[in-house]
Image (cartoon, grey):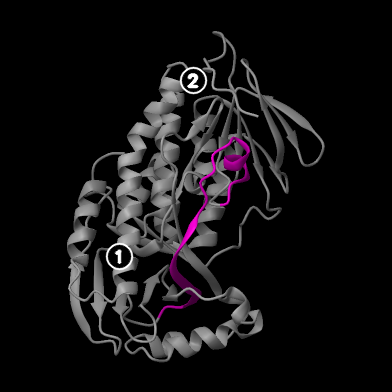
C-alpha cells in the first residue's frame, strides 16, 4: 500500500490534485492554503456533521492566532473570541497566588491568548473551506490507498474512486491513514483524564485561572466570549465505563464543588450530562518521518499531547502552514521536500509534547518543587520563533 519512490510535481501546465483526509483544524487549514495557490483539493470527512457542534472551548495562543491570520480568518476569530494576556494561579479556595504575564508567541501585534467556543472556530474554518472552492464530501472515508510511481489511487467508502498526486492525512489522533501506510505509532494514555463543559462566564472572569490541588490535579477555566467560558477539571484517568453517561454532570459537579472563587457560580451550570465531555490525556510523536511515498501526515495524525500548555491546535495549524508553504514553493514534491517538512516541525513539536507531558507527570508524582513556570516560559519563548 506504500511506495517510497519520489513524487515530482506534475508537468508544467498541469494542476496538482490533492486529497485531504479529515476536516479538523489541520485538514481545513491545508485545504484553504492549497486552494489559495490554485491546487485542486478534495476534502473528505468521516463525520456527516463535519464536527460542527463538537467540543466546549479552546485556548488559542499567539502562534495559533498567527496562522489563523495567515488564513485570512483573524477578524472573525477576534470577533468571536475573548482575548487576554495574563494567567492566574489560585489556591483551591480561589485565593489568587500569582498572576503571570502570558508570552506573546504570535508577536506583539496579536493577543497572547484567546479563548473561544470550539464549535465557533470549526464553523469559521468550514465556511472558509467552502468559500475556497474545494470539493467536500462528508460522511466519507478512504477504504484503500494504492501508490505507484505516478500517484495514489483511492477507493472511498461510498464505492467511488479517485486519483491524486498527493494525500494529506489529517484524520486525527486515531488516524486510519497512518496505520494504512505502515506507521505503527499509536496514542498512549498519560495517566490523566479531563472533564470539560461550556458555561456562562461569571462577572470578573477575564483570563484563565488554574488551581493545582484539591480533589482534582488541575481545576481551570477560560473565557470564550463576552458571555461564555469553558471549565475543566483534570484527574487521574479512570475507566470510562465507570461513570454512566447520564451521571457525568453529577460527577463533574462533585469534583467542582470543592473549589472556590468563580467555581461556585460555574458549578451551578453543570447540570446536563450531554454537555459534559470526559476524555483521557494521551501522547504520541511519530519519529523519523511523517510521510510514506505520496501520503503525508499533519496535525494529530503525526503528534498529540495533553492540553497542559494549550498547544495542540497551534501545532496542528503550524503543520498545515509549513507543509503548504513547501508544497507551493515550486520545489519537487519528493522525499527531500517531505523530509524538510519533518525537519522543520519536529524540534518544535517534540518540545511541546515533552513539556506538556512533563507538567502532567509532575502532578501525578506529587512533585511540589517543580519548576513549572520555568518550563512553560522556556517553551513559550521557543515558540515565539516562526515555525
Q: Residues within 10 Å of mark 2 (few under 14, many from 20)?
A: many
The residue at 41%/56% (across/down) is: 305
Taking 272 as reference, is 385 above or below it?
above
**Pick the front one: 16 or 334:** 334
State which region is magenta.
Answer: 174-201
- Look at mark 1 in the image and give the residue it sits on: 359
Q: What is the tally of numbered marks visible in this picture?
A: 2
The image quarter containing residue 140 is top right
Residue 334 in picture, x, y percent from top left: 48, 19
Quadrant in which the N terminus is drawn: top right
Asked whether residue 386 is drawn in magenta, I would say no
**Pick the front one: 199 or 317:** 317
Is label 2 in a helix, a strand or a loop?
A: loop
Residue 309 in picture, x, y percent from top left: 33, 61
The image quarter containing residue 123 is bottom right
Inter-mark Cα distance, 2 to 1: 38 Å
- Look at mark 2 in the image and give the residue it sits on: 333
The residue at 64%/52% (across/down) is: 50
Residue 30 in picture, x, y percent from top left: 50, 37
Residue 130 in picture, x, y percent from top left: 61, 42
Q: Is residue 306 visible?
A: yes
Is label 1 in a helix, a strand or a loop?
A: helix
The residue at 39%/42% (across/down) is: 318
N-term mark: 2 or 1:
2
Q: Is residue 268 visible?
A: no
**Pick the front one: 225 or 312:** 312
Amino acid at each position: 500500500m506504500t511506495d517510497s519512490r519520489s513524487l515530482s510535481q506534475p508537468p508544467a501546465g498541469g494542476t496538482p490534485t490533492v486529497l485531504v483526509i479529515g476536516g479538523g483544524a489541520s485538514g481545513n487549514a491545508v485545504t484553504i492554503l492549497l486552494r489559495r495557490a490554485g491546487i485542486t483539493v478534495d476534502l473528505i470527512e468521516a463525520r456527516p456533521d463535519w464536527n460542527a457542534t463538537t467540543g466546549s472551548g479552546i485556548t488559542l495562543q499567539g502562534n495559533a492566532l498567527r496562522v489563523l491570520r495567515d488564513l485570512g480568518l483573524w477578524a472573525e476569530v477576534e470577533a468571536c473570541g475573548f482575548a487576554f494576556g495574563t494567567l492566574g494561579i489560585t489556591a483551591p479556595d480561589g485565593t489568587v497566588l500569582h498572576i503571570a504575564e502570558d508570552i506573546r508567541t504570535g508577536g506583539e501585534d496579536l493577543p497572547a491568548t484567546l479563548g473561544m467556543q470550539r464549535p465557533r472556530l470549526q464553523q469559521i474554518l468550514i465556511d472558509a473551506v467552502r468559500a475556497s472552492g474545494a470539493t467536500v464530501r462528508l460522511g466519507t472515508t478512504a477504504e484503500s490507498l494504492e501508490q505507484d510511481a505516478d500517484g495514489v489511487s483511492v477507493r472511498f467508502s461510498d464505492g467511488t474512486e479517485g486519483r491524486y498526486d498527493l494525500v494529506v492525512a489529517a484524520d486525527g489522533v486515531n488516524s486510519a491513514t497512518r496505520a494504512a501506510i505502515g506507521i505503527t505509532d499509536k496514542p498512549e494514555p498519560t495517566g490523566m483524564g479531563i472533564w470539560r463543559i461550556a458555561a456562562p462566564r461569571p462577572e470578573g472572569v477575564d483570563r484563565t485561572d488554574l488551581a493545582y490541588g484539591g480533589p482534582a490535579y488541575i481545576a481551570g477555566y477560560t473565557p470564550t466570549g463576552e458571555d461564555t467560558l469553558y471549565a475543566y477539571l483534570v484527574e487521574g484517568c479512570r475507566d470510562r465505563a465507570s461513570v454512566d453517561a447520564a451521571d457525568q454532570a453529577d460527577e463533574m459537579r462533585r469534583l467542582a464543588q470543592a473549589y472556590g472563587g468563580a467555581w461556585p457560580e460555574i458549578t451551578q451550570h453543570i447540570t446536563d450530562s450531554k454537555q459534559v465531555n470526559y476524555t483521557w490525556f494521551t501522547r504520541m510523536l511519530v519519529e523519523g518521518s511523517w510521510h510514506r511515498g505520496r501520503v503525508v501526515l499533519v496535525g494529530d495524525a503525526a503528534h498529540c499531547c495533553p492540553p497542559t500548555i494549550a498547544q495542540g491546535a497551534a501545532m496542528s495549524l503550524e503543520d498545515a502552514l509549513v507543509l503548504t508553504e513547501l508544497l507551493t514553493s515550486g520545489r519537487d514534491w519528493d522525499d527531500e521536500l517531505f523530509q524538510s517538512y519533518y525537519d522543520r516541525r519536529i524540534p518544535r513539536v517534540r518540545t511541546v509534547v515533552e513539556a506538556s507531558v512533563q507538567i502532567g507527570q509532575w502532578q501525578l508524582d506529587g512533585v511540589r518543587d517543580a519548576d513549572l513556570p520555568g518550563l512553560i516560559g522556556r517553551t513559550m519563548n521557543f515558540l515565539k520563533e516562526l515555525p
